[in-house]
Image: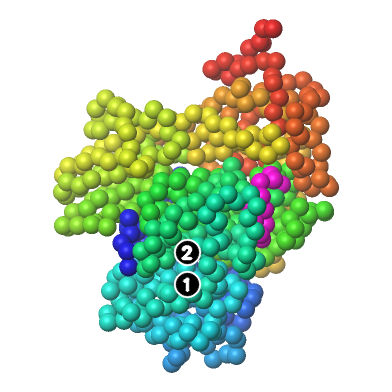
Amino acid sequence: VAPMKFLTMPLGEIRPSGWLYDQLMVQTNGLAGHQHDFYDLVAKSDWIGGDSYYSYLEEAGSYWFNAMVPNGVLVGDQTIMAQTQEFLDYVLDHQDESGWLGPEVNTTKPRLLWGRYPFFFGAIQMTEYNTSLTARVVNAFNKFIPLANKMLHAGEGVDRWAATRWEDFVLMLQWMYDNGHSPGQEKLLLDTMRMLKSTGDPWELYFPPGPAEDYENPFEELTWHGVNMAEGLKALPATYRFTHNQSDLDRVSSGWDLLFKYHGRPSGAFAADEMLAGLEAARGTELCLVVVSFHGSYLYQVTGEAKYADRVERMAYNALPATLTGDMWARQYLQEQNQVAAKNMTPNPFPEDGPYSNVFGLEPNYPCCTVNFPQGWPKFVTNAFVMTPDGESLVHLYLGPFRVHTVLSGGNAVNVSVDTLYPFTDIINTTISARKAFTYLMRIPSWVVDGTISINGQDPRPFLPVDGLLAVEIGPGVTSLQLNLPAEITIEERPHGSVAVHRGPINYAFDIPRVQSILHRDSAEPRAVDYEMEPSGTWQYAIDPSTLVFHQSASVGQVLPSPIFDAGQPPNTMSVQACPIEWALAGDTFAAPPPRRPTCVGPEATLTLWPYGATKLRISEFPTFTSERALDAHGNQVVLQA
């Protein structure tokens, strides 16, 4: 098996701090942390002896387990940790003599492989945090793998969904291989990897090698499915490790670029309301797609290509919080880039999904995202740092506030404290204590312009990253670093002559004033509510991008409001000259495409744009006009002379 470029670190060695810790606590105090209390798909899951499940795929319980294992550990929630331990114990205790794991034991339910894969990930994380569990988990895996291998050779266990998501099983097998957990059975592991690939969808053929304008998918329709596509992006780096074919990495790199060229969103995600959905701003992006797309982390760990990390960071700070209420008690199934209402939609802009899909609630449209979404923030944290394969260097990959306690090779105990309000400010202060000298690397995002670093209070100096990484030699003792990572306002061209506005990792949007009413309240948990949201003011504006001014009120050491991703909460905004225009609704609930070259129908005004993740109704793809006014550097209006 080919080596990784970077290695993940055991669960618990990386912890969120500052505003990011608060974000995990909001999630824990919200829907995610209480599902085991009242939500039958978790509390009465057939994975733990109950009778509740939502499909033959048997993914509800394993999705929840995979998400809540890291959630519980990262915030030290003993109740959640006990719940996930109970889940693990039940599944392992009920493994049958054949080696099968899961709720199908002692039933006549079909035995399909896919539903086990999220369970594998959760179990692996538990062994990372509590090594006393390793032998038990590994023994269970070593009983399951020969059975799965036999099933694959017999053409069993793979349905349409498992055929698209086989790469997740490969990752478990590679964990067993890399850690020497199947001594003498390496050929069985490799054969099972090859069988998963040969019985699954051929992702290397899915991405065309040349121009894609006229490309038609010749394979199973479900490879067009957004979550399957996000899963499938892991397939080629996973197969590269046992094929050693550079073409696997080349093809996924070009496929990644094509995916975001034809379906990408300013929020960092791509559009798929079930199937791939193109570039229109009213089409949807599924929440499961967003959290699964964080597997771009795996692409980076195999390849070291910085574009994957940049994209994951954009998704984390835009697409993920935008599709959850600030208190994280309600979630959407689909979010829209231009979202002018969240309600039962008639007509419905989503060809494959129901009209309830963009409502914020307990389980709008389908329950999968309810049990799956909690993995998003924890997996972002657990992949925020990586190590080089020799164990000698530490890499800060995703920027934000963290604490790290680890031991590098040679017994080099290292503690890292990252104090920052990033992405709401540009300054990142890092304090490192180390027993021995080592190399510390920091990812420098592609949007940084004229960044500087100060070491131990010295004068700031510019830097030149290599492959997106800035290397600093750290000596024994304590070292302090200060990174300044300024960025320019950038304009992204979107369909129909519209534009999106960015600075750094954040996409900026007009936060449409809203009124909300309750559609449904869960009888067992009154905090679990379905909301209808409608605009309470106009949203039909064109902007002049040349008048954009960035405003930032946060300072180092400030405590941000909680929850930070809610209306009026972030400390950074944009101001821009805008004018009201005629912009139609398509039906009565979603915006028509932005009009080209619209005419102002009222006087100009200064519009405030907010971080996309804090908006629940929004416009983030704007028509444009040419203002008769400009703004000076302080945001004051200046009348332009003819």
Residue 278 part of the magenta segment? yes
Count of numbered labels shown in the rendering: 2
Residue visible at 37% across and 30% down in the picture? 451
User: Relative to residue 253, is residue 234 depicted above or below?
Assistant: below
Q: Which residue is mark 1?
A: 197
What residue type is disc 1 on? Lys
For the C terminus, the quadrant is top right
Residue 124 part of the magenta segment? no
Q: Position of residue 591 (x, y in %)?
A: 76, 43
User: Relative to residue 587, is residue 184 depicted above or below?
Assistant: below
Which mark identifies residue 235? 2
Q: Position of residue 296 (x, y in %)?
A: 46, 54
Tell me where the magenta segment starts and ends, as one range: 270-282
> How far is mark 2 from mark 1, CA to CA?
8 Å
Badge 1 crowding class, 10 Å Cα cut-off, few under 14, some 14 to 19, many 20 or more, is many
**Residue 595 or residue 394, whichever sits in front:** 595
**Residue 160 or residue 455, whichever sits in front:** 160
